[in-house]
Structures are given as C-alpha cells and as structure tokens.
Image (tube, rainbow, N blue to C red):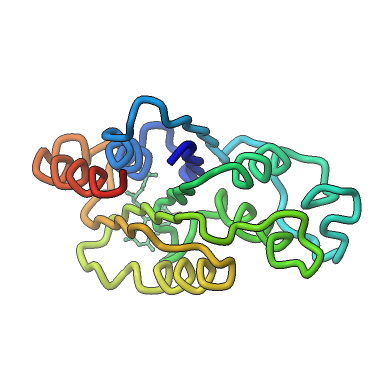
Amino acid sequence: MKKITLIFGSPRKEGNSEIMAEQLIASRPVDVEVDRFHVSGMKLGGCIDCRKCWSKGKPCIIDDDMQKIHESLISADLIVFVTPLYWYSWSAQIKPVLDRLLPFLSEDAGANLHGKKAVLVASAGDDQESCFKGLIFSFRQSCSLLGMEIAAELVRTDLYEKGEISDKVDVMEEIRRQGRDLF
Ligand SMILES: Cc1cc2nc3c(=O)[nH]c(=O)nc-3n(C[C@H](O)[C@H](O)[C@H](O)COP(=O)(O)O)c2cc1C
C-alpha cells in the first residue's frame, strides 16, 4: 500500500470520528503517503446531475475543491470515509463528496475506483449499534457499485461530547489493534 486518502466529514476538528480514524491508521508503515481532507469549510457543492462527467478531461466540470479530492482518490490505495452519525446517516459536510463520486460510474470514465480498499469510520451519541444500520447500508451499496473492496467498518456508539473517545483507553487500544490488520 502506497497511499491513503482520508475524508473527514465532521465540522468538529479533533472530534470523535477524526480521533478514531487517526488511531486506525496509526500503525501504517512509515513510507505510506497520507492525504487528509477536512471537508467542513472546503468549497464543495453537491452533484448537479449535468451528465457532463469527463467532458473536459477530468471527472467533474464543477470548479471547486472536489477536484483535489478526485485527484487524491484516483491515486489512493485505501480510502477512509470518516463521519459523525447525523440523523442516522452521513454528515451534510461529507455527503457532497459521495454524490461527486458519480463520475467514477460513468461509461466513459477516465479513471475509476475499482479494487481500491474502502473503510468506514463513524461515531454516534446513541448507545445502540443498530443506529448505524442506514449508514452501513449506504456505505456497502456504494462500495459495491463503485467496485471498491470494504477493508473495515469501524463504528462506535456512546460518543457525544467532543473528543471523549480519547478517554476510553480500551476502545482506543482496540481500534489500534484493528488498524494493524489493515497494513
Ligand atoms: C446534527 C446532529 C445530528 C446527530 N444525529 C445523531 C444520530 O442520528 N444518532 C446518534 O447516535 N447521534 C447523533 N448525533 C451525535 C453525533 O453523532 C456524535 O456526537 C458524534 O460522536 C460526533 O462525532 P464528531 O465528534 O466526530 O463530530 C448528532 C449530532 C449532531 C450535531
């Protein structure tokens, strides 16, 4: 593995989902390159369904920060989608990124995500793991359509306050162990 792309969907810097993701990749080999995108605050709109994917030689005609993310995704071996659970689904901040993966399904795609590894990382305030059902369904179906291989699904409940996962030593250790299996 040469490169990891992380897409952080929380508006909270150093929130629970970000801490989980960083812990998961903490055991990566030193020569692995890491691209990090904190999408909250980036100039990033949703797909406008113009059906003009690749018409200008690149995935999307919209001139915004998704261009940088597209480039990173194309060269990544492992893509980590990181989100807080918002209303049983993706955060509004990361959803445009998912919508803008449409060019990779296009028939005349200049690149695609086939065979890349995908990881879902999500945190929730709820105490029932079933709260992730909708998010996991969306992730699995999307990976299947895009031809991506799911390498891990890391979801954790009982996390409401900012950064509180750091105090849960056992959970942090368990995540680090899970991360070792990725590399
Ligand atoms: C707008 C909003 C919606 C939320 N919706 C849910 C939800 O549906 N289920 C849940 O368990 N927690 C929900 N939460 C709580 C967050 O998922 C939880 O605090 C999470 O750990 C935040 O992750 P972060 O620190 O990475 O931002 C919501 C929080 C916000 C702000």
Q: Position of residue 65 (x, y in %)?
A: 71, 38
Tell which of 151 and 46 is nearer to you. 151
Who is closer to the viewer here, 59 or 8?
59
In this view, the residue in front, 100 or 116, is 116
Q: Quadrant of residue 155?
A: bottom left
Q: Residue at x 30, y 55 (%)?
A: 154
Horizontally, residue 44 falls left or right of residue 124, namely right
Give left or right: position of 8 versus 127: right
Q: Residue at x 29, y 33 (%)?
A: 26
User: Which of the image's four quarters has the N terminus?
Assistant: top left
The quadrant the C terminus occupies is top left
Residue drawn at the location 33% of the way across and 59% of the way down: 153
Whether 119 is drawn above or below 69: the answer is below
Q: Quadrant of residue 165?
A: top left
Residue positioned most to the right: 56
**Left or right of 104 on screen, residue 147:** left
Q: Can you give x and y, in whole percent of width and height, for residue 140 in the image?
A: 45, 70
Q: Position of residue 121 (x, y in %)?
A: 37, 52
Give the x, y percent position of residue 36: 51, 34
Left or right placement of residue 135 versus residue 63 in this view? left
The number of numbered badges drawn on the structure is 0
Residue at point 50%, 74% (across, down): 141
